[in-house]
Image: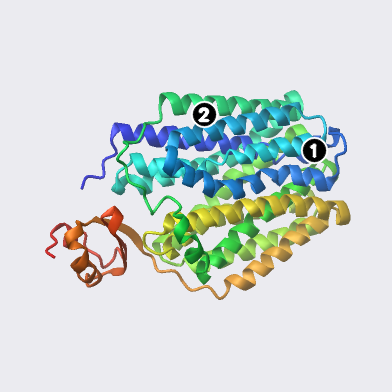
Amino acid sequence: MSEVITAVERRAIVSLASLYAFRMLGLFMVLPVLMLYGEHYEASTPLLLGMALGAYGFSQAILQIPFGSLSDRVGRKPVIIIGLLIFAMGSVVAAMAESIYGLILGRALQGAGAIAGAIMALVADVTQDQNRTKAMASIGASIGVSFSVALVLGPALAKIGGMQAIFTMTAALAAVGLVIVWRWVPTPMATARRHRDTGTVPELVGQIARIGELQRLNFGVFVLHAVLMASFVAMPLVLEQNLAVGRDDHWLVYLPLLILAFVAMVPFIIIAEKQRKMKGVFISAVALLATSEVALACFIDVRWAFFVALFFFFIAFNLLEATLPSLMSKIAPAGAKGTASGIYSTCQFLGAFVGGVGGGWLLQEFTFSGVFIGAAVMLLLWLLIAQNMKSPKHLTLVKVPVSLDEVDRVDEFLSALPGVAEVIIIEDEATAYLKVDDREFDQQSIENRDW
């Protein structure tokens, strides 16, 4: 089959990646500035500001799987539109908030527009199997770009109009998202099947949640995003109060460090994937992140040392953000990647909430160093748990259409093919899901099948 991306697929990938990026940009722009400007909210405390920072994670974690399931019943685009409207409403509430409680409500509403699962499912509906990995990679890249842009754009907008300017921009981005859905996102055919490799299957949730290797990864992404949120509770304040970096100039710190960290990270991604040393790179990144948190705690008054520690923080965080989904994909059973991804994302967003609240409490009780040390302790616990993980097999997913009269004999045939590690046949989809080792598997053996 041709791997050429069609014009419709290209339009779908670009529009949906933009949609995802705009939403994440609106959520991330708050990170570098909320603790700096949050003192102006009535009744604000470090704990409540931390809760506002992570509040979107709580509602997102609760609603993202239900929103994905709803999109199976009523359609992808209606659910995405509803989610964007809720996100816009939350942005308006946050922009108008004068008290910390209004801000928390607005942030929780932002997260309640939980459209990530519906977007991923729509990508699967409008792309061919052989192009789906490229589409998902494009969306993943858009998230990384939105994070980097947010750390630069957030301080710039806050300089112009404080937190209100950021939330107004976020509402505007939601409006742009609605236009994108209306004008550019293709509508899937009514006959499009649900894709188990991208969507969450509710009846599989309990089974997938009990897989030990996936539990380690779910705990890991929970810790990773808890550490991110906790660190940004303290980091902007350290830059301004301890290191005399004006709040309008924080982007001058973040931007070069992020660019350099991205460049430094790339060789390790290549080593992990191409040389199949995923576990070693993964464990090293967790250890580096823990070390950087300790260094941030120790050097809160030494500018150059703090910046070096921050540089290694960004390397480790970006490396883990890239490798964890890859690990999850390799470990998830054939035909259950979407379900595994849904549980993984739920843990990620819960981590963001816990990190915001926990970081705020640590700042309130133990000052800046206490936040970084608390993050380091969580990372050391993760490192301890991760040590026992198995080296993942580097397998890829292959889907094979089968007719109902072939089901009884196709399992034996596919399982016997060189390079096939796992076969799951879903009769109601008339599809066999295979996990294969590309070094041994020959696609031609299926195309010339005789069963």
How is the rendered protein coloured? rainbow
Q: Give the residue type at disc 2.
A: Gly
Depth check: give the residue in front, 370 or 20: 20
Q: Say how many tags the image has.
A: 2
Q: Is residue 334 left or right of residue 113?
A: left
* Residue drawn at 69 percent across, 59 percent down: 292
Residue 367 picture location, percent across and down: 86, 53
* Residue drawn at 18 percent across, 62 percent down: 406
Residue 43 picture location, percent across and down: 88, 38
Residue 124 picture location, percent across and down: 37, 44
The answer to whether 204 is drawn above or below residue 53 in the figure is below
Q: Give the residue type at disc 1.
A: Tyr
Q: Which residue matches tag 1?
A: 101
Residue 117 picture location, percent across and down: 49, 45
Q: Is residue 431 left or right of residue 169?
A: left
The answer to whether 292 is drawn above or below residue 68 in the figure is below
Residues packed near mark 1 inside 10 Å, few (<14), some (14 to 19) or many (20 plus): some
The answer to whether 95 is drawn above or below residue 270 in the figure is above
Q: Which residue matches tag 2?
A: 177
Q: Decide if residue 259 is in sight here.
A: yes
